Image (cartoon, rainbow, N blue to C red):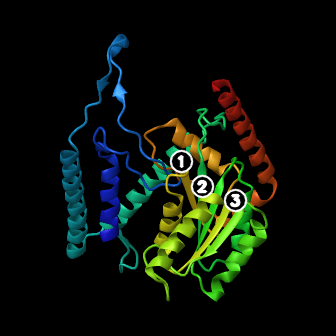
Amino acid sequence: MRSVASAFAAALTWWAPPPALHRDGAPAPRLPGWPWRPLPLPRAQAGRQGGPAAPLQHMPVQLTTALRVVGTSLFALAVLGGILAAYVTGYQFIHTEKHYLSFGLYGAILGLHLLIQSLFAFLEHRRMRRAGQALKLPSPRRGSVALCIAAYQEDPDYLRKCLRSAQRISFPDLKVVMVVDGNRQEDAYMLDIFHEVLGGTEQAGFFVWRSNFHEAGEGETEASLREGMDRVRDVVRASTFSCIMQKWGGKREVMYTAFKALGDSVDYIQVCDSDTVLDPACTIEMLRVLEEDPQVGGVGGDVQPPGKGMAVEDDQVQAAQVRAMEAWSVHQRHVSREQ
């Protein structure tokens, strides 16, 4: 019951008007997203017929947040109360003679929730894949992107496919950072696979760290811990392909290491797990969405089951690379004209 109420509460929150993200003059906050970027400061709204610009009017942040919290809480309580009342009274819409099969309020809410999710997913997918939409970067700016791969005791074949697909991404100067959640001997095979696929050049770098950013490893001193942090940053920022093996801390710690090491050295961060096969055009497509709408802070990819996703390993790779490179050529021509 709790999960259903939480899901509907989240749906209500989605429908609620968005609050002001920050005050004028405050630094732009960062939204977690894949890829994500700093959110823009509020823009001025131009007056009619070329008149002076007037600032956008927003409801106070505290009031908007309070209304959303109250509305979400009341809706969740109403859903929970209805489900509990139906359970106590034994009310059911449809049931067989001996109640082997039944359909009650809980099932109706679950079905409605699934229907609403599917509807909005379909509409969004259709909008993103509308016919005749050109694959292009909408502005002549040069946005730098880093792909962060989280790895933990991954199947060797899956990891190889992931790294090879990352190597084939058609985006100039893409930085790839793989962080391995574990630095023991049994984790060393992932570093070997990294060397096999992406290593062997001056662009590749790696570092085996006894610690992580929140927990010191065995035998670490304050000075050696600080030195390790600096080494991680140097390796990640100086290398096109980098691999960091660190003390186990979970996926959140892995992501923290990648984000902390990159800092503000790139404009966008793209993330994936080590069992993901990436389409060669994925980065440029997601970047296009971010650049077209300044209100978008994060973009999720079209994730498909292994049977369909592995097709990118074969005949779709070349076509996707051609599309991406054509888009980048158009982008470079715009840059040349601007200069």
Query: Looking at the picture, how far across and down is residue 180, in whole percent?
Result: 59, 74
Q: Quadrant of residue 207?
A: bottom right
Residue 53 x/y as whole percent = 32, 21
- Residue located at (53% from left, 47% from top): 267
Label placed on residue 12: none
Q: Amino acid at mark 1?
A: Asp
- The answer to whether residue 267 is left or right of residue 185 is left
Say which element carries label 2.
strand
Asked which secondary structure carries label 1, the reply is loop
The residue pinned by badge 3 equals: 166
Location of residue 318 in the rendering, given as x and y in whole percent from the top left corner = 80, 50
Q: 109 or 175: nearer the eye?
A: 175
Residue 63 image offset from top left, x and y in percent:
18, 46
Residue 59 lies in what quarter of the image?
top left
Q: Which residue is mark 1?
A: 267
Residue furthest to the top? 49
Mark 2 or mark 3, earlier in chain = 2
Q: What amino acid does circle 3 point to? A: Ala
The disc placed on residue 146 is: 2
Q: Image quadrant for the C terminus?
A: top right
Residue under the image location 24 percent in, 56 percent down: 72
